[in-house]
Image (cartoon, helix red, strand yellow):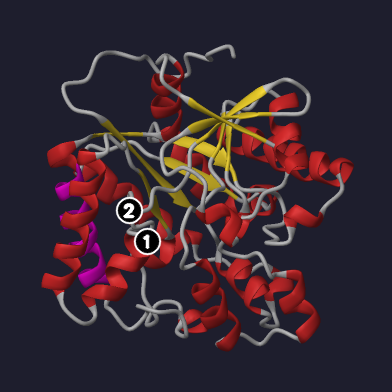
């Protein structure tokens, strides 16, 4: 596999941890949840993007933003999305329509979905995505083949956890989805098959004899429970000490098993129900934005004590330069 040298690779004193944010917009949450009004593409990017960029500047941190192509196609979002690369962050492809039934698409439809999103993201940000994450952590063999055929460096769609069915039950319980829509979304948050996949990055060996790097969203090694920020915020509602212990356990297990985390963020990790009343039903939306920002900084500080924090492409290229990558066959 050819490395793109998108970012310079240099030796690090600590192991790496990549930070990414799925830039799911208001309309995409509403659409997935079965709420009316999403068709007009309501947005909170003008609220969220300036806040997250200033916080990341304060932390001197550059991350990867996975952008939905539909947002990049709308002129009203152009300035907000262009600001991401102006501030030296990486952008990735999060599909065009943000549909967690992406795995059901035939290959030709998938190709259009990926390339349409790529075209608009490139046009608006000036940067061609080389990484992809499926909405709702869904994926398929066809998807991986399309990514490899079109020169993507990595996929980041797998969430290896046994809690996915429980998360899905809760999501359906709070949703306005019909029986048919629930069936369509039955793999949102991943499947039990995904739970047995490795937590560490690995190479997919595809039917085309090509390979593609998989960068799973890291769950606790051995235990395989999620510890990305949404889960930590949920725990903080009960006890900050519990949240801190949970994170400490996760990082200890990562260090013991030599797992370099891929740590995931979402906009709702930093903004709250008072700003986005349409999404007040989500867990943690009763926590104030100021409190979320405070916890976010504490979590990132804890990560940075043990890992050098980088974007996804830097991490992916570093991994591909090593000789100890495991292989998964389809």
Image-based side of 206 in relation to 219, left or right: right
Hey, which quadrant is residue 38 in on the image? bottom right
Q: Does the magenta segment cover residue 291?
A: yes
Q: How many marks?
A: 2
Q: Which residues are magenta?
A: 289-303
Which residue is located at x 50 percent, y 49 percent? 80
Which residue is located at x 50 percent, y 66 percent? 44
Label 1 near label 2: C-beta < 8 Å? Answer: yes
Hey, which quadrant is residue 291 in on the image? bottom left
Question: Residue 195: image x %, image y %?
Answer: 51, 55
Image-based side of 12 in relation to 263, left or right: left
- Residue holding disc 2: 220
Distance from Cα at disc 2 to Cα at disc 1: 5 Å
Q: Quadrant of the N terminus?
A: top right
Label number found at residue 225: 1
Which residue is located at x 77 percent, y 85 percent? 179
Q: Quadrant of the C terminus?
A: top right
Question: Residue 285: image x %, image y %?
Answer: 37, 79
Q: What predominant SS class does the magenta segment belong to?
A: helix
Q: Does the magenta segment cover residue 195?
A: no
Depth check, front residue: 220 or 316: 220
């Amino acid at each position: 596999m050819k490395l793109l040298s998108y970012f310079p690779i240099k030796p690090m004193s600590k192991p790496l941890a990549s930070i990414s944010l799925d830039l799911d917009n208001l309309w995409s949450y509403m659409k997935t949840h079965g709420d009316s009004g999403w068709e007009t593409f309501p947005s909170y990017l003008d609220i969220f993007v300036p806040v997250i960029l200033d916080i990341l500047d304060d932390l001197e941190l550059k991350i990867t933003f996975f952008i939905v192509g539909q947002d990049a196609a709308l002129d009203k979002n152009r300035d907000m999305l262009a600001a991401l690369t102006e501030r030296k962050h990486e952008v990735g492809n999060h599909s065009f329509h943000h549909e967690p039934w992406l795995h059901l698409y035939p290959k030709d439809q998938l190709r259009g979905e990926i390339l349409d999103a790529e075209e608009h993201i490139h046009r608006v940000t000036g940067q061609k995505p080389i990484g992809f994450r499926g909405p709702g952590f869904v994926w398929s063999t066809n998807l991986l083949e399309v990514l490899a055929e079109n020169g993507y460096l990595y996929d980041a769609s797998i969430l290896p956890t046994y809690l996915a069915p429980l998360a899905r039950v809760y999501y359906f319980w709070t949703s306005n989805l019909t029986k048919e829509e629930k069936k369509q979304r039955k793999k949102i948050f991943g499947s039990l098959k995904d739970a047995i996949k490795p937590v560490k990055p690995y190479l997919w060996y595809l039917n085309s004899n090509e390979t593609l790097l998989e960068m799973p969203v890291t769950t606790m090694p051995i235990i395989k429970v999620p510890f990305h920020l949404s889960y930590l915020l949920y725990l903080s509602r009960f006890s900050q000490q519990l949240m801190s212990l949970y994170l400490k356990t996760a990082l200890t297990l990562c260090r013991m098993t030599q797992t370099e985390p891929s740590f995931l963020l979402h906009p709702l990790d930093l903004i709250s129900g008072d700003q986005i009343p349409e999404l007040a039903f989500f867990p943690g939306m009763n926590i104030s934005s100021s409190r979320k920002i405070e916890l976010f900084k504490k979590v990132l500080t804890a990560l940075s004590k043990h890992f050098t924090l980088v974007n996804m492409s830097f991490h992916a290229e570093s991994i591909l330069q090593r000789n100890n990558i495991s292989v998964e066959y389809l």
